[in-house]
Image (cartoon, helix red, strand yellow):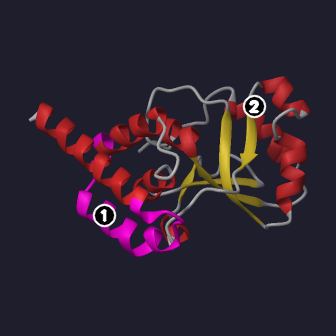
């Protein structure tokens, strides 16, 4: 895990967002932004996926200020995206960690714990998501029992097609175990 200075172009972008906000806002972040900036995967990303902005009434203003197509997006080439359809483990809020603590006066960015972050990618399961999971499993390294338990207890009961996600999780675990066998 890393908590280094905010790299470009995020530093200038977030500084302008911070300066333009009228009140403090906490952003619960997921996706490639967190995997790369918090957990060190060398993969470019052009957005910050946000599953919660607190206070909740700040969402619309954030989208206008820093969303896709905004002046800040055109200026910096990156943007904020409010994600409304990500399945998250039940108690993820209890395990958030702050990214770039103290870097801004109004914006606070929080990363999901690596297990919760992985589980948000379960339903989508694109090739990019599988690579993110592989990376997280290596750098954390994942305790596969924690991953399974969190899935079973905090996510599976809320999924529309849990049988499909059960299979995806089993495949991910096989990939992780295979990777670990190669490096042994």
The vertical placement of 9 against 28, above or below, is above
For label 1, count other residues whose C-alpha is less than 10 Å away and answer few (under 14), some (14-19) or many (20+).
some
Residue 132 vs 58, above or below: the answer is: above
Q: Secondary structure at mark 1?
A: helix
Q: Position of residue 68 (x, y in %)?
A: 81, 36
- Quadrant in which the C terminus is drawn: top left
Instruction: Decide: few, some or many residues near mark 2? Use Cα within 10 Å; few <14, some 14-19, many ≥20.
Output: some
Q: Is residue 50 magenta?
A: no
Q: Earlier in the sequence, mark 1 or mark 2?
A: 2
Direction from residue 77 to residue 175 in the image, left or right: left
- According to the picture, the residue beneath numbered tag 1 turns out to be 148
Residue placed furthest toward the left? 184
Q: Quadrant of residue 72?
A: top right
Q: Nearer the viewer, mark 1 or mark 2?
A: 1
147 inside magenta stretch: yes
Q: Which residue corresponds to mark 2? A: 12
Q: Is residue 23 above or below residue 74?
A: below
- The residue nearer to you, when weighing 14 against 123, is 123
User: Is the stretch drawn in magenta largely helix, strand or loop?
Assistant: helix
Q: Residue at x 82, y 41 (%)?
A: 67
Q: Rounded to the nearest whole Å, what is the CA distance between mark 1 and mark 2? A: 39 Å
Please provide percent x and percent y for residue 20: 89, 46
Q: Residue at x 87, y 32 (%)?
A: 69
Q: Is residue 149 left or right of residue 124?
A: left
In the image, the segment drawn in magenta is 138-163
**Residue drawn at 89 percent across, 35 percent down:** 70
The residue drawn where x is 54% and y is 43% is 34
Residue 115 x %, y %: 40, 57
């Amino acid at each position: 895990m890393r908590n280094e200075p905010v790299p470009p172009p995020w530093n200038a972008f977030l500084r302008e967002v911070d300066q333009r906000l009228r009140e403090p806002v906490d952003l619960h972040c997921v996706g490639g932004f967190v995997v790369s900036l918090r957990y060190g995967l060398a993969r470019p990303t052009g957005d910050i996926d946000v599953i919660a902005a607190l206070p909740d009434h700040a969402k619309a203003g954030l989208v206008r200020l820093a969303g896709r197509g905004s002046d800040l997006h055109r200026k910096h080439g990156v943007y904020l995206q409010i994600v409304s359809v990500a399945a998250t483990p039940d108690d993820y809020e209890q395990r958030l960690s702050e990214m770039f603590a103290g870097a801004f006066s109004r914006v606070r960015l929080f990363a999901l714990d690596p297990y919760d972050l992985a589980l948000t990618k379960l339903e989508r399961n694109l090739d990019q998501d599988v690579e993110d999971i592989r990376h997280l499993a290596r750098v954390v390294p994942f305790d596969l029992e924690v991953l399974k338990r969190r899935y079973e207890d905090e996510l599976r009961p809320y999924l529309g097609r849990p049988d499909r996600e059960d299979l995806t999780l089993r495949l991910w675990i096989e990939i992780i175990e295979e990777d670990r066998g190669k490096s042994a």
